[in-house]
Image (cartoon, grey):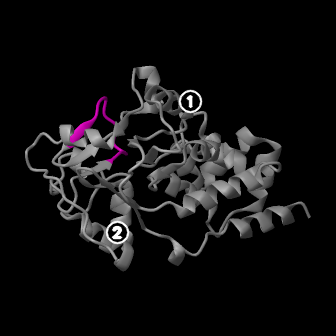
Amino acid sequence: MRDQPMKRFRQKLHAPDTDLLQPVQRYPLNTRGRDFVVGDIHGCFSMLDAELAARGFDPARDRLFSVGDLVDRGAESPMVLDAVQRHNIRAVRGNHEQGILDWALRNDMDPTQVQAMRENPSEAIAEWAYHDGHTSELVYNGGQWFIELYCAEDNPVKARDIVSYFSTLPYAIEVETEHGLVGIVHAEVPCGHWQEVTHTLEVRRSSQVREIVLWDRSRWTGGHIPEHVGGVSAVVVGHTPHREIFQRGNVIDIDTGAVYRYLGNKLTMLDLLDIPDLLTDGKATPVRPAHRP
């Protein structure tokens, strides 16, 4: 009988209709304050709080965008919804959010494993991961915190709310700025023109392009990919950590490995007004957004 609440919980967790997902979200020019975009946070929300305080961030006027990977590996990952609400974070989906969705919304969850997890968490997760590839992958990528939250009898609502929030995250964001349109995705731009990216995500709903947007590192590992993305002044990404902001063409990687702060790494937050100073290759010229009815 004790399995029944978990079965009902699993039914509630099953994803919102993917046809309702807005793959690309667009934001007009901010005429009241500043726009920032933050690199991969990975559950280091105290670092985010400190950076925002140092910038004098005011959520009533300023906007905070995120390149995704809000969670995993960092100890404060369970606080993700609190941080999103306090700072009104506007995030794209990262591969870590997708990994949690893939695990939580699957159809073959074993309720006996859930019960075992409740009774002896550490041993049960290790056993579960040994026999189940989905669980093994999530644990390997730092998502054990979510498994524990999911299986805790007193926290199913919190886990459900995290899944619901991650399910709404777009694959791309575009922001109008004083120096033109800026695109944001988690990992990579798979096309040479921004409008081709958005069209593919919104109209074609290509799973291959989604995978590239979430996972690909070709730009930084020597792959053959166009350096310059047309139709935008710049694209800001994360996913591939560097010690400092890394730029190639008009694509700017701001993942500076915040979760590895014990190695001296830091959390990077970029003011969108500073983007022209980072575009040093001479190829990126400001592009004004097309008129939309």
Disc 1 marks a residue whose amino acid type is: Ser
Look at the picture and state if 281 lies above or below 22: above
Report if residue 239 lies within the magenta region. yes
Please tell me the numbered disc located at residue 208. Answer: 2
Q: Quadrant of residue 276?
A: top left
From the viewer's side, name the closer residue of 202 and 60.
60
* In the image: residue 119, left or right of residue 24: right
* In the image: residue 130, left or right of residue 176: right
* In the image: residue 159, left or right of residue 32: right
From the viewer's side, name the closer residue of 88 and 165.
88
**Is disc 1 surrounded by few (<14), some (14 to 19) or many (20+) residues within 10 Å?**
few
Residue 205 visible in the picture: no
Number of callouts: 2
* Secondary structure type for disc 2: helix
**Is disc 2 surrounded by few (<14), some (14 to 19) or many (20+) residues within 10 Å?**
few
Please tell me the numbered disc located at residue 46. Answer: 1
Q: Quadrant of residue 290?
A: bottom left
Q: Main secondary structure of the magenta part?
A: loop
- Magenta stretch: give its range: 237-247
Report if residue 242 lies within the magenta region. yes
| Residue 198 in the image, given as x and y percentages of width and height | 32, 69
Residue placed at 40% from the left, 48% from the top? 67
Disc 2 marks a residue whose amino acid type is: Gln
From the viewer's side, name the closer residue of 35 and 223.
35
Question: Cα distance, mark 1 to mark 2?
Answer: 35 Å
Look at the picture and state if 257 lies above or below 21: above
| Residue 221 in the image, given as x and y percentages of width and height | 22, 45
Mark with earlier residue (1, 2): 1
| Residue 215 in the image, given as x and y percentages of width and height | 37, 54
| Residue 232 in the image, given as x and y percentages of width and height | 22, 58
Residue placed at 60% from the left, 40% from the top? 77
